[in-house]
């Protein structure tokens, strides 16, 4: 699994979200039945069926899928926001560093000027 998402990866995730059935998704389950459905609404046709594991595992998997649908857009937005803020902080840090370099240069020039004046005396 990748450790860093590229802008292309984020674009792919956004297109995948846009292509999926519209939210909200709901878990449709019956207490005495192991089969669990994920549906965009209770009345509609299911978009996913969990039927191959125990009822508890099917319910947990279905809830995970619904949560993933709900949070993917939010997570992508958060990644983009944090990357933007990180870039802003790097740029501010670079400006501050440049100011310090400029001050050090000015200080060194002033020091040389004072030394030159002192040596002329």
Image: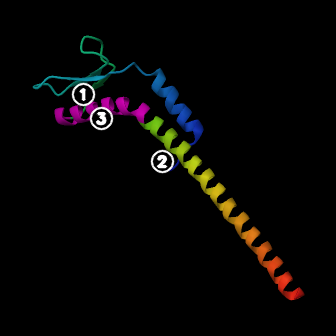
Q: Which mark is residue 64?
A: 3
Question: Residues in magenta?
Answer: 54-74
Tag 1, which secondary structure? loop
Figure coloring: rainbow
Q: Which badge, 3 or 1, comes first in the chain's sequence?
A: 1
Decide: few, some or many residues near mark 3? Use Cα within 10 Å; few <14, some 14-19, many ≥20. Answer: few
Q: Residue at x 40, y 19 (%)?
A: 21
Looking at the rendering, which quadrant does residue 43 occupy?
A: top left
Q: Are marks 2 and 1 in contact (CB under 8 Å)?
A: no
Q: In the drawing, does residue 83 fall left or right of residue 40?
A: right
Residue found at the very far left of the displayed protein? 32
- The residue sitting at 54% across, 49% down in the picture is 86
Magenta segment: does it hold 63? yes
Q: Residue at x 89, y 86 (%)?
A: 120
Front in this rendered view, residue 36 or 22: 22
Seen from the viewer's position, the closer of residues 3 and 108 is 108
């Amino acid at each position: 699994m990748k450790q860093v998402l590229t802008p292309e990866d984020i674009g792919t995730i956004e297109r995948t979200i846009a292509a999926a059935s519209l939210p909200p998704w709901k878990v449709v389950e019956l207490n005495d039945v192991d089969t669990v459905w994920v549906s965009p609404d209770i009345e509609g046709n299911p978009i996913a069926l969990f039927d191959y594991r125990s009822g508890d595992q099917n319910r947990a998997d279905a809830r995970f899928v619904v949560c993933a649908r709900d949070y993917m857009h939010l997570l992508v937005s958060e990644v983009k926001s944090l990357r933007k803020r990180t870039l802003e902080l790097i740029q501010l840090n670079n400006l501050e560093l440049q100011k310090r370099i400029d001050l050090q240069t000015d200080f060194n020039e002033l020091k040389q000027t004072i030394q030159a004046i002192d040596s002329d005396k």
